Amino acid sequence: MELIHIYKAIQDDLAKVKGNLNSVSRIDFDWLSEQLNYVVRSSGKGIRPALTLLAGKFYHYNRQHLLPMAAAVELMHTATLVHDDAIDKSVTRRGKPTIFQIWGGETAILLGDYLFAKAGESVADTQSPRVIKLFSQTLATISSGELSQLCTAFKLKQTRQQYFQKIAGKTASLFSLATESGAILSKAPEKSVRALKEYGHNLGIAFQIVDDILDFTSTEEKLGKPIGSDLAQGTLTLPAMLLLERYPEDNPISRLFQNQDRDRQKNIAQTIELIRSSSIDQECYEVAAEYCAKANHSLTELPEDASHRALVNLTNYILSRET
Amino acid sequence: MELIHIYKAIQDDLAKVKGNLNSVSRIDFDWLSEQLNYVVRSSGKGIRPALTLLAGKFYHYNRQHLLPMAAAVELMHTATLVHDDAIDKSVTRRGKPTIFQIWGGETAILLGDYLFAKAGESVADTQSPRVIKLFSQTLATISSGELSQLCTAFKLKQTRQQYFQKIAGKTASLFSLATESGAILSKAPEKSVRALKEYGHNLGIAFQIVDDILDFTSTEEKLGKPIGSDLAQGTLTLPAMLLLERYPEDNPISRLFQNQDRDRQKNIAQTIELIRSSSIDQECYEVAAEYCAKANHSLTELPEDASHRALVNLTNYILSRET
């Protein structure tokens, strides 16, 4: 099922959120306005704001608070991407040159900060100190997760537990903020708040596992950035971990991590080839599917309505997505 | 008058704020904990948190909300410094190597983000959506001010108005957040909120002008970083603007900005020498003093108590400070 169908129950409000995001660039400072316009318009699939709106649909759908919250999660997401690209020195994202590539790392830092600020302004409009606190805690979790990834870069000895901790921090935390805040702002009972938080967390883990698979199995055209990027950054993802386990004696990941300069491209290409010709991607998809099943399981707490179906469909979409 | 005397009315609470700031580093992630400990303990004079506490003293001094607000302004300040050092590639601050220098630009970006997040958590504890919104707006203003500085770097044709706009954004906005939030959280009447906001703004402008003077007239030992840093970054500050006006035909700033690589150190040294041997620093101090007078003038709205005297003394301190 395509996203446009999954989003049906909230499509009008999601369009409003996108309109509000675009209006962030309407400021009286041409240079910054141009960058904001560039980065906000090249935004992605809108999964995070859609999650907030869908999670807000079960009880008292409070448009006045849910719309700024949905904008806030997307702005925070965009800000983290701008900073990530500066950290990784990435030159393309979503098929376009990154802010880092066009305007440099200095601008990327400040533009990211500006986007965090706009996200903060938007979340303040929810008037909910609880949600505002959650929002800030999530930013702390994300940056701490990214720092954890940075300090384990090019390290071969990493446990699955570490991997799941890192992706929980850098990705799942924002997914669970999106759903939990939607639940809180619609005055859901605490049991449902927990259920939607849990759904968001598990969906986020699955989303990141699929991201990590696609980084090996997709194409540059589909991904909008070079494949094998994680490995090039020294990030050991689940597919890479499985490959290391399968060939403990001699494999291109060990060679790459032990000597980043020698035969770099060759080692990356070999890793991609080995993963593609193995059943590793399938094994990883099975792990992602388990998290999607967990996500769906937590929804049993909630009314069986159109949003419920949309959230279930979203787990299927996550598993089948190609980009 | 020394800061310790100016802070007398709030010294116990300021000590508590510092204790709370130190506790930010007590986390179960050694790598990040070490960096947080390093950056929080090498913090400065505490002017911003002191401003929040002093501004909160005039009406209903609400310790429960003022303490987290004071911590939030200091955390935001620290976060911006960590990012600034990454942007400027500065190697020393306050006499110690910067985060950028020790752990690199990637860590500096994420550590700054983490500090913004902790600031956001702290401001959420004020439970005041108005103050939370102001906080985020201030971060937008600061990053926009810094971006404005970045996009005018090494440009010779800049007006005083542009200079004052930039320092209002990058410095005075946080000073006025500190005082305005203190006023709001102590339930000051709106007239007093405006007066304290105004005080903070004008004090912040004066503070930055003095900063810009000291960058030419102080010593590396006192400043804790190399003198002439602004010029090296291509930032045209008030003393430099006055020098350009005084010697429009031929001067080392024009030479430096037109060709950054040729005789770089010589041009910076000549500029420092020319400013020191002129009355330019005095003229700049006069401008700063005007802003301090404006700051004091806005205090006439407020009760004449110990906090009032402390804020007046602070304007004198700002003008006479050597570091």
Image (tube, coloured by chain):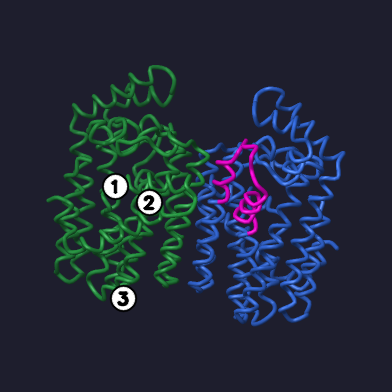
Chain colours: A blue, B green
Q: Is residue A148 magenta?
A: yes
Mark 3 or 1 closer to N-term?
1
Rendering quarter of residue A198? bottom right
Residue at the front extreme of this rendering:
A249
Residue B216 position in % (x across, y down): 26, 32
Displayed quadrant of residue A217 = top right
* Residue B238 numbered tag: none
Q: Which residues are magenta?
A: A145-172
Chain at numbered mark 3:
B
Q: Pointer 2: what residue?
A: B77
Q: Residues within 10 Å of mark 1 (few under 14, many from 20)?
A: few
Q: Amino acid at mark 1?
A: Gly
SS type, badge 2: helix
Q: Is the residue under label 1 in contact with that under label 3 (CB below 8 Å)?
A: no
Q: Main secondary structure of the magenta part?
A: helix
Query: With A40 as the anchor, is A287 left or right in this view?
Result: right
Residue that badge 1 annotates? B44
> Which residue is located at x 79 percent, y 36 percent?
A272
The three-letter code of the residue at mark 2 reads: His
Residue A237: where, in percent of width, then height?
Answer: 70, 45
Instruction: Determine contact: label 2, label 1, CB under 8 Å.
Output: yes
Residue A74 horizontal side relative to residue B19, left or right:
right
- Which chain does the residue under circle 1 lie in? B
Determine contact: label 3, label 2, CB under 8 Å.
no
As helix, strand or loop, the secondary structure at mark 1 comes to loop
